[in-house]
Amino acid sequence: MRRLIVGTSWKMNKTVSESRTYIKDLSDFMNKNPKLIKEIEVFVLPTFLAIASSTQIVKETNSRLKIGAQDCCWEDSGAFTGEVSPMHLSDIGASLVEIGHAERREIFMETDEMVSKKTAAIIRNNMRPILCIGEEEKPENINVALKFLEYQLLEGLSRIDRADIKNVVIAYEPVWAIGVSASAPLDYLSKAMTFLRDLLNKKFGGRCGDLQDIIYGGSVTPESAKDILALPANDGIFVGRSALNVDYFISMIKMASDIQKLK
């Protein structure tokens, strides 16, 4: 049985002090409810400035909460002014790094080549990439979207060994469903995620796709989370603005625990 994953990226929100309070509250909840989160993986991606203090809180409280980053450079060091090294992130205790988010691709002009180089750099530094993929618009024929997803996913994985694919978390985030009032339709999500699993099985053999961690992100709310988590082809949720409230985020973790018991 694949475990469920509940994660959040705060984007450019929360000060360091606000982040510390949130991480402490979330860690306390997890420590007080070990049975509830036994089969659930929980992660938070704060701003760069809050990562070190967040990992320190997790260490001090002996929490199972995982802390990661929202991006990184594809090189460990060198003349890359303003960039953040994956080696440095690993050194301060980050365990995951999000890459390829639609905002990075659109606003900062990141290409599939850049994303694939970052995937390799994160793996090289013993962290898990959260590889974001997603079509920009909802097509009339879903096969158009599936063809795009195939290209984007395989490009993102192109610089790592097959054995390392299992360490990648694939975040399916249709761009047209990010920052809107509702998540993508459930039947649409199910078809897309099933396609991604079948693609990985076909491309890399064995049960690669069946065992891959694939989660959904895009306007996930406490109201929509339960049905999304229950989809057979889905392994979790990647939450944005709804998770800025720690109580809302905890409610989604509880939902995931209830769903996990039924799977």
Image (cartoon, rainbow, N blue to C red):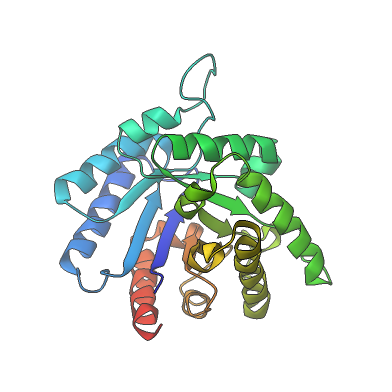
Please say if 259 is above or below 26. Answer: below
Q: Please say whether residue 134 is visible from this viewpoint.
A: yes
Number of callouts: 0
Residue 24 at x, y percent in the picture: 23, 52
Outermost residue toward the top in this view: 79
Question: Residue at the location (55% across, 41% down)?
Answer: 160
Q: Is residue 254 left or right of residue 124?
A: left
Q: Is residue 170 left or right of residue 114?
A: left
Outermost residue toward the bottom in this view: 262
Outermost residue toward the front in this view: 206
Question: Residue at the location (40% across, 29% down)?
Answer: 87
Q: Nearer the viewer, residue 108 or 59?
A: 59
Residue 250 at x, y percent in the picture: 33, 67
Question: Residue at the location (76% across, 63% down)?
Answer: 145
Please say if 87 is above or below 197. Answer: above
Q: Quadrant of residue 54?
A: top left
Q: Quadrant of the N terminus?
A: bottom left
Q: Please say whether residue 135 is visible from this viewpoint.
A: no
Outermost residue toward the right in this view: 140
Q: Nearer the viewer, residue 202 or 107?
A: 202
Q: Nearer the viewer, residue 198 or 102?
A: 198
Please say if 171 is above or below 120. Answer: below
Residue 117 at x, y percent in the picture: 59, 34
Residue 88 at x, y percent in the picture: 38, 28
Question: Residue at the location (32% across, 31% down)?
Answer: 91
